[in-house]
Image (cartoon, rainbow, N blue to C red):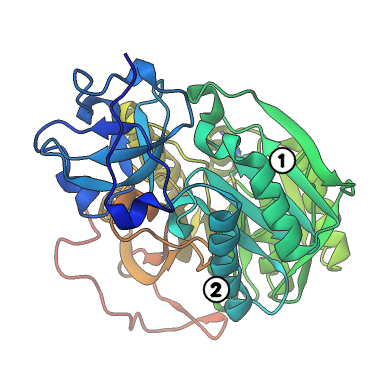
């Protein structure tokens, strides 16, 4: 039996072909009607609209149990996220014209913000393009297709990007783990043109080499750009530890910003080799050092050796990839932050980020506070950071606000602060209210 077809109003019948209908169970339509772009498989009325009748990536009309159309989306019957909505208009299709229109709108935002062509051009649901990420490295585009629905539209994605940007090359970095859940193959290929081995980008005057074919994700983490800028006032003359450094987004920035010494820790040797090259490219190799290894282990060793830093930056990978990892992942954040506080000079700055959408901003703040307390330090939150504006947040989707960063100062109550580079003779910092910051 095939899925029931939706009947469209006469005005729509002329432009829209009919689609299979997917019915939601009673009361399961609320979240989607409020604009959340996902339907989970347990919300579908499979008796009325069997999922087995649908092919992965097929476009459907989603209806509430009372027959009210909610919108159009594409399905993947095998995935827990069963439908990704494309919009409320019943005529919406994931075709060349729609992709072109939405990519153009995404580009208009980026060109308004950035003077140079280095940014995330399309950010999935945040740009109403579920399953599609496009990073722009000048005239080279690095694309990730994450869902069966977007995979079906691959030729249209490529041709829409070719028309919009006229790139030298389009690389498909389809090696993201989520593709397996969608039943898609893991592959890296060049979809058009010829991609150079590495490409130079620039962030606020600092040069970085990006490996679009072999680097992590699409090659570069654009989401931290503004947070990298944020650290500059705190690093002049400082001894800085950049943990989970990758190719030096923070560390090289700190060195150019006048840090006395920067030690960068990462478990990926290729990333650290690239970091060293990035340091040379910006003529700061004399102050930048790399330490390969597991961050938890390296930080313990640094502490045992009595090393101390004025600024510690923590930008770990997502320790909580899925809901079931929440407990273990939260503990990992706690441990790494505690280790970081243990390495800070008495009056130091900890910059601590989390890119796990399952760890809320409040939870991160709470665990920073308790990690500071466990090291007998008072804590001030000085600045807060987010993912950059080229990673727009979907307003109905709290999980799309995934990147959180706190820039904190922490100190030992009673220890004199450093003022203009020298220790002042009076401890004139406001002490925390009684009981706060000391245990
Ligand atoms: N701060 C970087 C991005 C960090 S991405 C920037 O601004 O560009 C997270 C990094 O953590 C990756 O480079 C990955 O290689 C590294 N990593 C993952 N697990 C690690 C571990 N246990 N110890 C050290 N590094 C780790």
The mark that comes first in sequence, 2 or 1, is: 2
Residue 392 is labelled as: none
Residue 380 image point, x, y percent: 33, 69
The quadrant holding residue 238 is: bottom right
Taking the spot 55% from the left edge, 37% from the top edge, the residue there is 146
Residue 109 is labelled as: 2
Image position of 215 with respect to 436: above or below? above
Viewer can see residue 309: no
As rendered, which of 346 and 163 lies closer to the eye? 163
Is disc 2 in contact with disc 1, using a CB cutoff of under 8 Å? no
Q: Which residue is mark 1?
A: 172
Q: CA distance from mark 2 to mark 1?
A: 23 Å
Residue 276 image point, x, y percent: 82, 52
* Quadrant for the N terminus in the image: top left
As rendered, which of 230 and 431 lies closer to the eye? 230
As rendered, which of 260 and 60 lies closer to the eye? 60
Ligand 1 quarter of the rendering: top right
Residue 107 image point, x, y percent: 61, 68
């Amino acid at each position: 039996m095939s899925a029931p077809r939706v009947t469209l109003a006469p005005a729509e019948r002329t432009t829209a072909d009919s689609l299979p209908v997917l019915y939601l169970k009673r009361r399961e339509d609320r979240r989607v009607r409020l604009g959340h772009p996902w339907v989970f498989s347990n919300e579908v009325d499979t008796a009325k609209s069997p999922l087995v009748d649908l092919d992965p990536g097929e476009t459907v009309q989603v209806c509430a149990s009372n027959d009210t159309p909610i919108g159009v989306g594409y399905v993947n019957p095998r995935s827990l996220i069963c439908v990704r909505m494309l919009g409320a208009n019943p005529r919406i299709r994931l075709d060349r014209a729609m992709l072109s229109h939405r990519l153009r709108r995404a580009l208009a935002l980026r060109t308004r913000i950035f003077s140079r062509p280095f940014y995330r051009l399309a950010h999935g649901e945040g740009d109403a393009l579920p399953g599609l990420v496009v990073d722009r490295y000048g005239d080279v585009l690095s694309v990730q297709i994450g869902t069966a629905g977007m995979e079906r539209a691959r030729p249209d994605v490529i041709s829409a990007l070719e028309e919009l940007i006229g790139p030298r090359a389009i690389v498909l970095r389809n090696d993201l783990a989520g593709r397996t859940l969608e039943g898609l193959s893991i592959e890296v290929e060049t979809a058009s043109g010829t991609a150079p081995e590495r490409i130079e980008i620039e962030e606020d005057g600092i040069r970085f080499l990006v490996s679009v074919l072999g680097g992590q994700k699409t090659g570069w983490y654009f989401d931290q750009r503004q947070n990298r800028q944020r650290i500059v006032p705190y690093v002049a003359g400082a001894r800085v530890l950049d943990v989970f450094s990758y190719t030096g987004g923070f560390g090289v920035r700190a060195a150019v910003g006048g840090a006395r010494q920067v030690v960068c820790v990462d478990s990926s040797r290729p990333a650290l080799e690239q970091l060293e090259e990035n340091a040379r490219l910006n003529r700061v190799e004399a102050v930048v050092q790399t330490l390969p290894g597991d961050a938890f282990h390296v930080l313990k060793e640094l502490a045992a050796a009595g090393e101390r830093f004025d600024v510690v930056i923590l930008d770990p990978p997502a320790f909580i990839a899925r809901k079931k990892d929440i407990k273990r992942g939260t503990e990992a954040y706690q441990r790494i932050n505690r280790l970081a506080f243990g390495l800070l000079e008495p009056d130091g700055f900890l910059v601590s980020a989390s890119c796990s959408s399952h760890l809320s901003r409040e939870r991160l703040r709470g665990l920073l506070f308790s990690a500071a307390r466990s090291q007998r330090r008072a804590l001030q939150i000085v600045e807060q950071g987010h993912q950059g504006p080229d990673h727009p947040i979907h307003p109905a989707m709290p999980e799309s606000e995934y990147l959180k960063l706190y820039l904190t100062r922490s100190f030992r109550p009673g220890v004199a602060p450093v003022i203009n580079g020298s220790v002042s003779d009076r401890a004139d910092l406001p002490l925390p209210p009684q009981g706060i910051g000391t245990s």
